[in-house]
């Protein structure tokens, strides 16, 4: 995500790092580079101006200049300014009513229908029962698309192909959702290729009549400043509660993400990071600033990891970790879960200090990464139950047997055992801690 912005900022910090004493001249040089990085990332000019105004005063202040590690302080300032720019954002989603209505709007192709499905899936993971509503009556294909997505997610989809009035469809859907015990209704409204009066009128009527608790606009992050402009226009008509920015997994420069809150006043609430229905994340300014600056996003990493295991497995894992156990089978399960192309890269981007590793991994193609993991799983599979229970019994003879069973070399078996030991140490070391300590540990 935002690779070139990250690289450019890294360059700016490098000019300051290692300089024992900072002068106003080299601090200004660092600031100039930060400014350049933001402009190149397509951040709105006004936003850059204000951003720079904020940090320049602080960076040239005595506190930073006299600090023992001024370059660290400088990164801290940029971090804080990014957080200010992106936030504040309410934590989670307020769903305190018996039935909560979420209205999703957006231009065609922004990713609205996909996001409706992703949001339903995210809510189901939180044990909330959602219903999807096909309120886009412009295109018959839109209704079919929502049904397909609903089936994939395993969630009820309400549609009424005979009804041409979207407001009535939404009202009927809410009544049905109440009867079916759903807590959230997600309205997939009509989109257009461009903003027009008719569309806005329709959305305003739904808004007035159905009175949604949340109105979210889905914008395509790849469209840069156009995404910011459409957010502004929709907000004028509808008073949005938040923006969902999609396609941030692609080759986006990041400018729209950094500008939208400042320009429109509407915070980003979710980000779409892939085509898969699991690829929606709550937006957290702190996490995003950490990712942009290569300092990791530990909370995001935990959330991502917890999507991979079901609840029973999480519970079982927690229990065995609390007993100080992390078996070879646990290790195998973990490996298998992340053996999906692209997934490792995504998780690595959230780990603090993993920037370099990520660059290295990027050289290897994604299929190959997944292939490596499959090989490791193969090695574990050719171990006997006794060896899996106590890997310390693996001597040279056993190692050779395991290697030939898995079609790999003794060296690879050794590597695997080493990685298992490392992971075991990390996992069992973290097991006794509370969640807060665990995060602290991950950041060290
Ligand atoms: P709608 O017209 O706004 O309802 O858009 P769709 O939901 O049909 O999405 C348009 C295209 O964008 C589809 O091919 C989606 O798979 C794709 N898409 C949606 N969100 C994302 C995302 O976060 N990342 C990527 N890479 N593609 C996305």
Image (tube, helix red, strand yellow):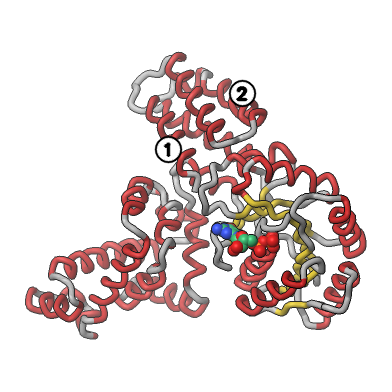
Q: Quadrant of residue 114?
A: bottom right
Crowdedness near tag 2: few (<14), some (14–19) or many (≥20) residues, C-alpha within 10 Å: few
Q: As displayed, is residue 20 above or below residue 89?
A: above
Point 52% across, 52% down: residue: 250
Q: On the rendering, which quadrant does ligand 1 occupy?
A: bottom right
Residue 122 point in image, percent of width and height = 62, 67
**For residue 430, side relative to residue 284 (left or right):** left
For disc 1, the marked residue is 7
Q: Which label sits in the foreground, 2 or 1?
A: 1
> Is the residue marked 2 within 8 Å of ligand 1, measured from its CB?
no
For disc 2, the marked residue is 53
Mark yes or no: residue 217 visible.
yes
Are the residues flagged by discs 2 and 1 in contact, CB closer than 8 Å? no
Q: As displayed, is residue 403 above or below residue 202?
A: below
Mark yes or no: residue 112 visible.
no
Residue 431 point in image, percent of width and height = 40, 66
């Amino acid at each position: 995500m935002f690779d070139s912005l990250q690289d450019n900022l890294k360059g700016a910090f490098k000019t300051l790092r290692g300089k024992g004493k900072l002068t106003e001249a080299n601090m200004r040089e660092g600031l100039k580079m930060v400014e350049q990085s933001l402009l190149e990332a397509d951040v709105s000019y006004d936003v850059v101006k204000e951003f720079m105004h904020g940090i320049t005063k602080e960076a040239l202040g005595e506190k930073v200049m006299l600090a023992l590690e001024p370059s660290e302080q400088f990164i801290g300032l940029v971090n804080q300014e990014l957080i200010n720019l992106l936030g504040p954002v309410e934590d989670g989603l307020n769903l305190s009513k018996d039935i909560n209505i979420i209205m999703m709007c957006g231009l065609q192709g922004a990713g609205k229908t996909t996001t409706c499905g992703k949001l339903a899936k995210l809510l189901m993971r939180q044990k909330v029962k959602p219903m999807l509503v096909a309120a886009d009556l412009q295109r018959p294909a839109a209704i079919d698309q929502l049904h397909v997505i609903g089936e994939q997610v395993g969630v009820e989809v309400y549609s009424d192909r005979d009804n041409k009035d979207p407001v009535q469809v939404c009202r009927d859907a809410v009544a049905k959702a109440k009867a079916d015990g759903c807590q959230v209704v997600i309205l997939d409204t009509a989109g257009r290729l461009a903003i027009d009066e008719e569309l806005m009128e329709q959305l305003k009527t739904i808004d007035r009549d159905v009175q949604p608790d949340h109105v979210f606009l889905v914008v395509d992050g790849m469209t840069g400043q156009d995404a910011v402009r459409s957010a502004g226009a929709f907000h004028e008509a509808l008073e949005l509660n938040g923006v969902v920015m999609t396609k941030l997994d692609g080759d986006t420069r990041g400018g729209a993400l950094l500008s939208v809150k400042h320009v429109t006043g509407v915070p980003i609430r979710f980000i779409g990071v892939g085509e898969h229905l699991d690829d929606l994340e709550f937006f957290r300014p702190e996490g995003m600033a950490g990712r942009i600056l290569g300092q990791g996003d530990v909370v995001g990493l935990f959330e991502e990891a917890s999507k991979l295991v079901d609840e029973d497995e999480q519970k079982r894992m927690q229990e065995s970790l609390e007993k100080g156990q992390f078996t070879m089978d646990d290790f195998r399960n973990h490996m298998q879960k992340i053996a999906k192309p692209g997934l490792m890269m995504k998780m690595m981007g959230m780990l603090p200090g993993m920037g370099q590793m990520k660059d290295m991994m990027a050289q290897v193609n994604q299929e190959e990464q997944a292939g490596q993991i499959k090989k490791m799983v193969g090695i574990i599979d050719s171990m006997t139950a006794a060896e899996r229970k106590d890997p310390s019994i693996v001597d040279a003879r056993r190692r050779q047997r395991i290697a030939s069973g898995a079609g790999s070399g003794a060296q690879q078996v050794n590597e695997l055992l080493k990685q298992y030991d490392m992971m075991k140490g990390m996992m069992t070391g973290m097991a006794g801690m509370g969640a807060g300590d665990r995060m602290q540990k991950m950041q060290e």
